[in-house]
Every structure is written in structure tokens, then in C-alpha cells.
Image (cartoon, rainbow, N blue to C red):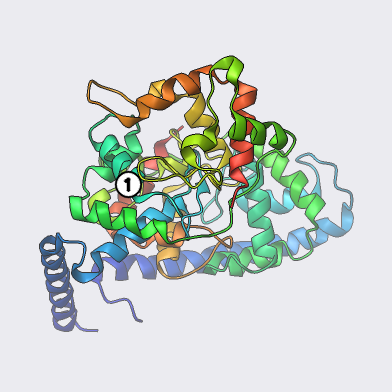
Amino acid sequence: MSVVIPHVTVPVNAQGARKLEVMKRIGLKITVLAILAVAAPAWAGDWESPAVRNCTWCHGTSAQGFMVAPRLAGQRPQYIENQLRSFHEHTRDEPFSKQYMWGAVAALGPRTARDLAIYFAAIAPKPANDGDRNLAARGRTIYLEGIPEANVVSCYACHGPNAEGVRDIPRLGGLAYFYLKGRLKHWQEGYHSSPGSPMPMVAGHLGPDEIEALASYLSFVK
Amino acid sequence: MNLTGLRAVVQAAMLAVIFSAAAHAQEGAPAGHGGLEAKLEYCKTCHGLSGQGYLGYFPMPRLAGQQPQYIENQLRAFSERRRTNPIMFNVAHVLSPSMLTALATHFKNLNPKPFGGAPRRSIATGKRIFEEGLPESNVPACSACHGTEGKGQNEIPRLAGQLYPYTVGQLTGWKAERGQGSAVDTSAIMAPTAHNLTRSQVEAVAAYVSYLQ
């Protein structure tokens, strides 16, 4: 193992175990899904449709997110569409994307991707509320002001005053702490998302405490 | 890894952090330890990798090819609160005077293609307003001060290639953002012109200049 700082080592093991657990469950779900997909062919544009179910198996029945799968409800439709494309083209390459999403979208056409994006964007999002409350105030300050002395840019400039996102810039408000933290760390580790995204540069300047604070704050934003 | 080894690694890591923090504190001048490079990367995170501008929740203006005197003046205006912008206030007020000058000079030499994306239907109207003004509404030709190619000079900004939503936002909200407080501010000269333009005239001029190279 290459990670040496002790407070990281423990969560990595726990995370590894959890990942295995998730993988097992997903393996089962995919088996069930394969049977369902044969039985129910048509895209109906609602939660009964196989295309929607294909997503909600992991992202939760009301698309509010579950475990490592982020909330889709209330996400910007252009962002969802964009990300589906980047999974399809393998440009978004962090471990969970590679493991789950590359396969999940392999047979997904652009029309269905768009329909799914519109469908999930229209569902009212619920905040995850799972961060550390004590860090929320610090996170809010970083979100709004950045840390100019340390060349950390303001998140607010792109993601909006209430972390609601715009166009293909995602809504961050209310996403799960675990997911937000993971994304920021993955950019730091050199994984990619959509081509041209400034996020690798943004995340590169954040320290671990700042990531904790931001992920905590954002998990509470309605 | 055993506990002693782990402890040694942690101590080494902590020392590294402390030393790098100390090195940071000593920097101050933009010349030292890549201070200018790091700050430029910070600017370009929002204003585009080659300073061409970027559309976030707010439009981030193009800085490429901008007049250094104008950039310097605006950065001062943000930190002196002559120009209202909470994000840019935070950015500007930590810049040392020498860093400010170095940043302003850097962008002058960048020349990426315009960001694009503006509606094209009123470009001809925009060109006419830019070159001839609107005498009946007391709007002088933009080209009289900003130059026939919209490149600006000294404290007068370059408009060529500026993001359409940015120019529209500035001209329609001029008096709410610029020339605040009692200090003398060069932006006062634009106040009557911005006021005398209608929304559709603003959009036409903004579209025209956004495509100028």
C-alpha cells in the first residue's frame, strides 16, 4: 500500500471493504437487471421504464443517491447528459466511473441519455445532510470566497450562490459528503472528467481539511 | 508498516508541510518561487486557460490582450470598492502592488480566438453603433475611444473578443457596479453612454465586439 499517513490508512481499508460489499450487491443487481431488460423492452419515459430502472438500481429509487452513486434528482440536465457522454467516451475515468458507469452506458444512445437527463433533473432534490456540522461554516467561507492567499478560487463564481449549478456546471448543494469528498480527491490524484473542465486546477490547491469542510458544507445546502 | 516507521513518516511529512508554509510566507515578491506563475494559474482557472474568458454562473471576462493599465486600475477599483464585486474584492485585496503590475502585463501578450457564442442577428446594427454612435441619443461612436478594432489603449479597455454576456451585463448594470463611493473613478465617463443605450442596442454592440479578433 502506498498511502502512508495514518489517518488516511484506516478509512482506505474500510472503504475497500465497503467497495467490495457494494460490488457484490451490484453484481446481484446486474443479474436481476439482465433478466428484467429482456422481459421489459420499451423506454416509456417514466420510473417504470427499464432505462430509468437501470439508473435507479444504484442511484436510489427516487434518484436521491445511494452509497457511491451520487444523487441525480435535481441535477442540471446538461450536466447529466455531458457526464453520460464522458462515461461513454471514457474521458471520465476515476475508479467508480470506470468500474460501474463505463459499462452502464456502453449501450446508451444520445437520445435516451437526453431523456434520462431531463427525467432526473425534474425530480426535487433532497439534501444528504451527512457532513460534519462543525465544519460547515468554514466550508461556506471557502465556497463563497475561496482562499485568495493560497490561490484557491471561489466555488460560487461557477456553481452559483446556492450551489445550484447552471447549464453543464453541476448542482453541488445537498450531494453526499462521501461523493463530494471523493470527487475533489480524484481530481487531485489526476483523474479526469469532461474535457476542458477547470476542476483539476481548482482541486489541486485544496488541502485535506479544506476538502472536508467544503464537502460537509455542501451536503447541507438545500 | 510498523508503528515506529509510521511515526517517522508522519513526522517527516509534518516537517515538510511546516517548511513549505515557511517558504510561502517568505515569498511576498512575485519573482520568488513561482509566485507569479501560481497566481497566473489561479487567474486562468476562472478566466480561461489562455485568458479567453469563461462562462461560469457569472461570465468571467476575457483578459487576453487587455490593456495592462485597465487591468491594474480595475484590480485597484475592486479592492478600494469603487467597483462592486464580492468575488473580485477577495481576489484583488491580497495582491501586492508588484504582483498586480506583473499580472496586468502578462495578459497583454495572449491572443486566443474570441470565446464566441453571441447571437449573430444584430451584428450589423452593432457595427454601426460601434463605428458611428447614435447621435440622436447622445451615444458617441465606441471606436472613438476604444479604437477602430476595439483594442483600447492605456486605461481604456479592449472590447475585442469580450464575452457577450459580460459586456451586456456591464453596460446594463454600469451604475450599480462601477464608480461607487466618492473617489474619482475613470468609469464615470461611460455612465451617460451606458444609460443612453437601450437593451437591444447594448445587445447589438456586445454581439459585434465579441467577434472582433
Q: Is residue B13 left or right of residue A95?
A: left
Vertically, is A87 above or below B60? Answer: below
Query: Which residue lies under the disc numbered 1?
Result: B69
Q: Position of residue B117 (x, y in %)?
A: 65, 45
Q: Position of residue A92 (x, y in %)?
A: 58, 65
In the depicted view, which residue is nearer to us: B127 or A216?
B127
Can residue A10 be spotted in the picture? yes
Vertically, is B60 above or below B36? Answer: above
Quarter assignment of residue A141:
top left
What's the residue at 52%, 56% (across, down)?
Answer: A68
What's the residue at 40%, 57% (across, down)?
Answer: B107
Q: Is residue A119 left or right of residue B181?
A: right
Q: For the residue labelled by badge 1, is the local secondary structure a helix, a strand or a loop?
A: helix
Residue lying farthest to the top in this orientation = B136
Is the residue marked by circle 1 packed among few (<14), some (14-19), or many (20+) residues within 10 Å? some
Q: Amino acid at mark 1?
A: Gln
Can residue A136 be spotted in the picture? no
Q: Is residue A100 left or right of residue B85?
A: right
What's the residue at 64%, 49% (across, down)?
Answer: A80
In the depicted view, which residue is nearer to us: B133 or A190?
B133
All told, the count of numbered labels is: 1
Q: Is residue A46 left or right of residue A86?
A: right
In the depicted view, which residue is nearer to us: B147 or A15?
B147
Quarter assignment of residue B41:
bottom left
Q: Quadrant of the N terminus of chain B?
A: bottom left
Vertically, is A45 above or below B29? Answer: above
Determine the chain carrying the residue at label 1: B
Q: Position of residue A105 (x, y in %)?
A: 72, 61
